[in-house]
Amino acid sequence: MSPLRTLALGALALPLAAHANDPYSYAQPDEVRVTHLDLKLKIDFPQRQLDGQATLTLDWKDPKAAALVLDTRDLSIASIESVDASGKTAPLHYALAARDKQLGSKLTIQAPQHPHEVRIIYTTAPSASGLQWLPPAQTADKKQPFMFSQSESIHARSWVPLQDSPAIRFTYDAQVTAPQDTRVAMSAPNDPNHPLNGSFSFTQTHPIPSYLLAIAAGDLAVKETGPRSAVYAEPSVVGKAAHEFEDTEKMIQTAEKLYGPYRWGRYDILVLPPSFPYGGMENPNMTFATPTVLVGDKSLVSLVAHELAHSWSGNLVTAASWRDIWLNEGVTTYVQGRITEALYGERQANEEALLSIQSLHKELARLPENGQRLAPKPGNVDADDTLTDVAYSKGSWFLRTLEQRYGRATFDNYLKSYFDHFAFQSITTEQMLDFLKPNLIDKYPGKMSWDEVKEWVYGTGVPKDAPVPASPNFATIDKERSAFLAGTLDAGKLDAKGWNTQEWMYFLDGMPDAPPLARMQQLDAAWHLTGTPNAEIGMRWYVHAINAGDKAVWPAAAEHATRIGRLYLTMPIYAALVKTPDGLAFAQQVYAKAKDGYHPLTQQAVEALFAKAKAGMH
C-alpha cells in the first residue's frame, strides 16, 4: 500500500486475539490450511451486498483436528456443507461467535471427517468494512453505481469467510455476476477486451494472502499503456490516467533489470473514485490507485512505482504477520526509490527519501518505544504500532544503509537472491535475518556488524550514523523559508517558480505548526495556494493556514476535504479544524455533507477524531 496510510488505521487498534499464530486472526493454520478458494459472487447494487458462495479447498495438517476455524465480519451465513472428491455434499454443524469489535466473528465449522472442501453460502452486510458502495452521484461520471474492496489489513473477512491472515496463501477462481454494462475487475489477470455481458471469470494461479483479494465493479473504460499494462478508470478519467501512467512498462522493465522477472503476467492500474481511503493498494495484477495522483506532470507517479515494487516485496515475499509488515513496506519503499531514480533522476528520488525521513522523525516523537522498532516486541501490539512511517521510512532507510555499506551491485544481487529464495512465501523478520546473515553480513565481513543490524531492526529511533541523501534544492529552500519567516524575504521573491511538487511539500512541511497569519496571507497572495488542484500541496497549505488562524481558507479546505476521501490528504485538515470550538463546529458541518461519499474506514477515523476533540474540550 502507498506510504502515509497510517492516519487511516487508528481504527485498527487491535488487541491480542485468540490464536498465537496471528493475533489478528482466529484461524488455526497448524491444524488445517485453506489452499484454494472457488468464489461465486453476485453483485447487488440496490441492496449494497454481495451474494456469495465460497468453496474452500483444505489441507488438513493435524490428524486430530476436529474443526475448521474461519474469520468473518458481519456476514449472514445461509448454509455450510462438506464437498467430497466426487462432488457429493453433506451439511456441517457450525457456530458463529459473538462479534468482536475489531476482529469480527469467529466461525467454527465442525469437520471431524476432514472433508476435501467446505462450501459456505452467505451474504455480505451493506456496512461491510472491506467494501464501499457508491451511488452514481459519488462517481466521477455520475452515471452508474460503483463498488470496490479494500481488504488490507483485516477486511477481507467482511466479504469472504476465510483464514484472514497474511501467513496463509491460496490460489483462487472467481465467477462474478454483475449488471449489464458494468465492468468487473479483480486481483487476478484481467482481460481489457472482456465484453460487458454481466458475467466475469477470474483465475489467480499464484498463491496470495487474503489481504490481496480484491474486487471492483462500475462504469470502467480501459486504455492500454503497454504490452502488459492498461489503465482502468471511469470514461472521463481514463485518458488523463493513461497519460499520467504512460511510463508503466518502463517501470516494470526497470524493476525487472534490478530484481528479476515480473512474475504476475499483466500489471494493470485501476483508478478509483476520489473516496478511496488510501493512495494505492498493491492488489496482484491490478493496483488500485487514488485519482489524487493525476496532477498532469507525473510528479506523483512514485505511487505507481511503490505499488509495482510490491510485486516483488509484499506480493511475492510477504510478511507473515502485521508485526513483520516492514518486510512489505520498508523493502517496497526502497525498491520504489530505485525505480524513481532510474526513470526520473536522483534529484526526485533523494527529495522523496528526505521527505520520508522528515515525516519519520515527526512520527518517532509521538510513538511509544515499542512502536519505534521495525519488529516490535511481542505482546499487546496493535496495528497503530506496526502500520506507521516506521515500517515504510525506517525500513527503507535500513536498506539504503545496507546498500551504502556493501555497494549497490552487491546489495542488488543480494536482494534479487532474497526475492528468489522466498518467492510466494510468507516470512517473519527472523526468517529474513537468518537469510541476511550468511548471504550478506558474513559473506562480506567488516562492512556492518550484526549488532548494528539488530539495532536497526529491534532498536528504538534511528541509528545516529544513518546516511542522509543530499539535496542542494532542499538546502536552498531551507534558507529561503528561514528568511521568509524572519521577514527578510518577501513571499513574492521566493524562487518557487521552478519548484516541483516535492519541493513545495518540503517548503510547507518545514513551516512551524502555527505560522504567523500575516506571513501565510502574503504567501497565498503571491502563489495562490488556496484552491490548488494539487492535493499534496493543498493538504499541507490548508493545515498551516488553519493553524495560523486564517478563516478565509476554511471554505476551500472544506471543498478539498469533501472532494477527497484519501485519509492521508483529508484527516490532517479535520485535525487542524477540531483544535478550536468554532473549527470543530465547522468540521462537523463539512463532515455531515461529505460523509456519504467517504469510505467506512474514513468515516470511522473522522468520527473517532471528533469524539476525542469533544472529550478534550469538556
Image (spheres, rainbow, N blue to C red):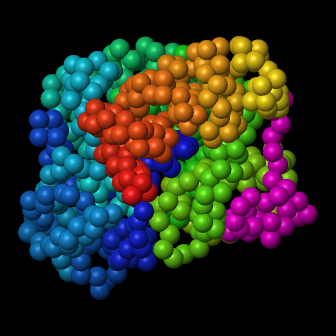
Q: Where does residue 263 sit, x and y in percent of width and height?
A: 52, 42
> Residue 298 lies in what quarter of the image?
top right
Measuring 54% from the left and 16% from the top, which residue is drawn there?
296
All told, the count of numbered labels is: 0
Horizontally, residue 11 falls left or right of residue 138, namely right
Horizontally, residue 206 falls left or right of residue 448, namely left
Q: Where does residue 545 sit, x and y in percent of width and height?
A: 56, 30
In this rendered view, identify the residue nearer to me: 187 or 84.
187
Q: Where does residue 257 sit, x and y in percent of width and height?
A: 68, 36
Horizontally, residue 127 falls left or right of residue 588, namely left
Q: Is residue 580 visible?
A: yes
Looking at the rendering, the stretch of residues picked out in magenta corresponds to 445-472
32 lies above or below 346: below
Is 447 a magenta residue? yes
The quadrant of the picture occupied by the C terminus is bottom left
Is 98 a magenta residue? no
Measuring 14% from the left and 38% from the top, which residue is drawn there?
44
**Outermost right residue:** 446
**Outermost bottom residue:** 64
Horizontally, residue 325 falls left or right of residue 288, namely right
Q: Is residue 330 visible?
A: no
> Residue 83 lies in what quarter of the image?
bottom left
Measuring 57% from the left and 20% from the top, which residue is drawn there?
529
> Residue 165 lies in what quarter of the image?
bottom left
In this rendered view, identify the residue nearer to me: 318 or 137.
137
In this rendered view, identify the residue nearer to me: 361 or 162.
361
Measuring 81% from the left and 40% from the top, which residue is drawn there?
469
Q: Where does residue 157 sit, x and y in percent of width and height?
A: 29, 57
In this rendered view, identify the residue nearer to me: 186 or 610.
610
| Main SS of residues in magenta | loop
